[in-house]
Amino acid sequence: MKSAKWIKRIKQGADQQSANRLIAHYFDEIYNYVYQRVNHEPTAMDVTQEVFVSMLQSLDNYQSEKSLFRTWLYNISKR
């Protein structure tokens, strides 16, 4: 899975290209999820950006053996 490769590279040294690819891969999905909850485009965009900032800041805490990355990312989106 591409996500695992990107995550590994980011954890190893803040690889910007892998971070951009990881975000691009999940962006529409997370944006749509957030939009369904807030029903306001500018707010959904802001919250989605916050989700990905939070994801990058806490990526070292992600453990693939405990949950799927998608599940972990949705948990961040619920906060």
Image (tube, helix red, strand yellow):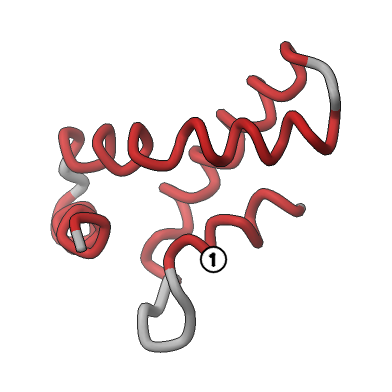
| Left or right relative to 10: residue 77 | right
Location of residue 75 (image quadrant): bottom right
Q: Quadrant of residue 35?
A: top right
Q: Amino acid at mark 1?
A: Trp
> How far across and how far down the image is residue 11, in percent?
23, 60
Q: In the rendered image of this protein, does residue 37 appear above or below residue 42? A: below
Find residue 8 and report its horizontal and vertical position in percent. Answer: 18, 63
| Residue 13 image position (x, y, % from top left) | 15, 52
* Structural crowding at the residue carrying mark 1, measured as other residues with C-alpha within 10 Å and reported as few (<14), some (14–19) or many (≥20): some
Numbered label tally: 1
Of residues 61 and 37, the one nearer the viewer is 37
Q: Residue at x 68, y 40 (%)?
A: 33
Which residue is pictured at 85% across the width and 24% down the height?
39
**Left or right: where does residue 63 sit relative to residue 31?**
left
For the residue pair 21 and 9, the one nearer the viewer reads as 21
Residue lying at 47% horizontally and 58% vertically, measured from the top left: 58
- Quadrant containing the N terminus is bottom left
Mark 1 sits on what residue?
72
Query: Where does the image place residue 24, in percent across and percent down from the top left?
Result: 34, 32
